[in-house]
Image: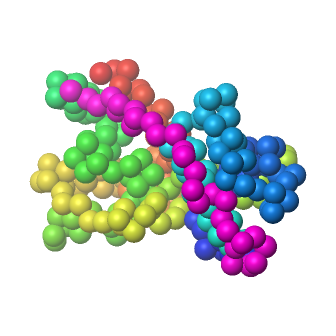
Amino acid sequence: VYMKHSLKQSTYLSYESYIRVHFKPAIGGLLLRDLSPRLLQQFYNHKAENEGLAPKTIVNINLFLHKALSYAVNEGYIQSNPAASLNLPRGNKPQIEILTRDEQAQLMRTTYQHRYGVFIRLALFTGMRIGELLGLRWEDVDYRSNLIHIRRTLSRLNKINRPTDGNTTEIVIQQPKSQNSIRSIPLLPAVVNDLHAWASMQQHDKLIAGEAYVESGFIVTNPNGRFIEPRTFKDYYNEILNIA
């Protein structure tokens, strides 16, 4: 009633998994009035100590529950929100393994040996996420100002209705994860040249494919002009890493 029609599909699926995987098996049979801060504290302690859930995951789960129970308070089902005053575990942020300068230089050299290496260079020069990269369209490139505009993401997500047979996932094109993610990124001259060269590659693909070619408008495309989904692009990236 409150959230389904205002959520991005990826957020909806996260909320649905919180309920299905965590809340429903453990406390799904309780009445709202039986929920207490102590009970929820024990629930989260168990998740951390016995199931090894990361602190950030527990915080995210409780943020979701707190929001849900705030509507229960508004509806008059309970007097106060039992998820409001809990002592949730705090963890250190995991160390992210980044490329050294030598590794980046080696990777850059290797990208010129692969059809899709141009997009590894684009990612290195702009910091785009993979979904943002694959969601780029030519209309997002402003050659006059040498800017590229991030307006959408392309992801493969579980279908909301979760079919029991057939394909359970689908490609979803939607706005980035937050308003701050909708942004414009300056392009260095080398990146602009790369994009011009890739546009020529697409024209070559079109000549080779003939009627099989699809004018999709996407920048990252296969030889038939269709977009490339994240897991396929990751395979290409792994090929480049292996060569490097």
Determine whether 74 is above or below 32 in the image.
below
* Identity of the residue drawn at 39% across and 68% down: 179
Question: Horizontally, is 1 left or right of 9 in the view?
Answer: right
Question: Horizontally, is 107 left or right of 50 in the view?
Answer: left
Q: Position of residue 35 (x, y in %)?
A: 76, 56
SS majority, magenta = loop
Q: Position of residue 77 (x, y in %)?
A: 79, 73
* Magenta span includes 235: no
Q: Quadrant where the N terminus lies?
A: bottom right
* Identity of the residue drawn at 82% across and 52% down: 28
Q: Position of residue 187 (x, y in %)?
A: 18, 57
* Identity of the residue drawn at 74% across and 79% down: 75
**Which of these two is toward me, 216 or 25?**
25
Question: Horizontally, is 77 left or right of 194 in the view?
Answer: right
Q: Quadrant of residue 141?
A: bottom left
Question: Horizontally, is 88 left or right of 35 in the view?
Answer: left
Rendering colour mode? rainbow
**Which of these two is toward me, 220 or 9?**
9
Mark yes or no: residue 197 visible.
no
Instruction: Please state the extent of the stretch shown in magenta in the rendering.
Output: 73-100
Determine whether 100 is above or below 80 in the image.
above
Residue reaching furthest to the left: 189
**Which of these two is toward me, 210 or 119?**
119
Mark yes or no: residue 99 visible.
yes
Q: Quadrant of residue 57?
A: top right
* Identity of the residue drawn at 85% across and 47% down: 164
Q: Quadrant where the C terminus lies?
A: top left
Q: Position of residue 195 (x, y in %)?
A: 25, 53
